[in-house]
Image (tube, grey):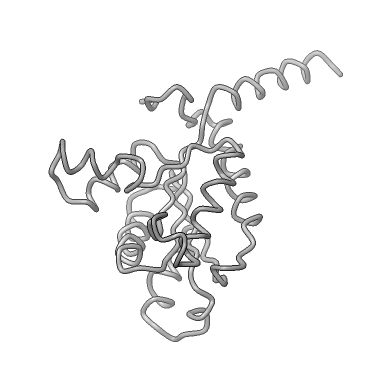
């Protein structure tokens, strides 16, 4: 191997070892994993992304909501969006509950008007909605696909490989352009 390629390989290995891409994973609570296929999909994605080296944050399960309740006492949507602005390179949203549909509207509006391409977005929706002529498909889901990716699946049997592969590609760009987060915590300003 040529010396320049060896140097580049070493620097890339250091980059991946010392950094994490933060993914905000939204969807049904993991407490519902026994009863809801969408919760099982969220758990599978959490496990797969974590084992692939992503830092995955679940707002309600990782202390973000407790921080809001006990420190800021602010609005949940403001708190989540500010966390995403400061820390996240991607949002993966499993649309299956009233809360996730609210998050979808907020996030796609932010992506379309304010994010300036700083955050990837993957919407995972029930395949039963795919062909509906509806506000969901003509509004938020369409915007999600225009500013990220909208995927319609059977929550029980969804193939997670395309999602993980997309995030891997985004992580590469995220790290190489200097936006990656240090693995020890604390974001770069």
Q: Nearer the viewer, residue 67 or 122?
A: 67
- The quadrant in which residue 152 appears is bottom right
Looking at the image, which residue is at 36% across and 41% down?
Answer: 62
Task: Look at the image and tell me in which quarter the C terminus lies.
Answer: top left
Q: Is residue 82 above or below residue 76?
A: above
Taking the image as shown, residue 32 lies to the left or right of residue 156, namely left
| Residue furthest front as drawn | 34
Residue at horizontal 48%, vertical 25%?
183
Residue 16 spot, x, y in % from top left: 60, 27
Residue 154: where, in percent of width, then height?
57, 72
The residue most toward the top is 3
- Residue 172: percent from the left, percent from the top? 61, 37
- Left or right of 146? Residue 69 is left
Residue at the bottom extreme, as displayed: 133
Q: Quadrant of residue 187?
A: top left
Question: Residue at 35% across / 68% down in the picture?
Answer: 97
Query: Which residue is depicted at the point 38% across and 36% down?
Result: 87
The extreme left residue here reads: 73
On screen, residue 140 versus residue 64, left or right, reads: right
Relative depth, front residue between 78 and 189: 78
Q: In the displayed structure, would residue 62 be above or below residue 26?
A: above
């Amino acid at each position: 191997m040529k010396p320049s390629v060896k140097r580049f390989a070493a620097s890339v290995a250091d980059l991946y070892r010392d950094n994490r891409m933060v993914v905000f994973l939204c969807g049904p609570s993991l407490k519902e994993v026994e009863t809801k296929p969408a919760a099982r999909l969220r758990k599978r994605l959490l496990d797969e992304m974590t084992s692939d080296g992503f830092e995955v944050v679940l707002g309600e399960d990782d202390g973000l909501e407790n921080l809001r309740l006990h420190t800021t006492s602010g609005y949940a949507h403001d708190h989540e969006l500010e966390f995403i602005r400061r820390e996240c390179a991607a949002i993966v949203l499993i649309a299956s509950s009233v809360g996730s549909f609210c998050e979808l509207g907020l996030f796609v509006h932010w992506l379309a008007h304010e994010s300036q391409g700083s955050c990837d977005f993957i919407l995972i929706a029930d395949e039963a909605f795919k062909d509906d002529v509806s506000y969901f498909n003509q509004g938020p889901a369409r915007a999600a696909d225009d500013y990220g990716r909208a995927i319609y699946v059977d929550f029980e049997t969804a193939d997670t490989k395309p999602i993980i592969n997309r995030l891997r590609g985004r992580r590469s760009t995220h790290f190489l352009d200097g936006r990656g987060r240090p693995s020890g915590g604390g974001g770069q300003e």
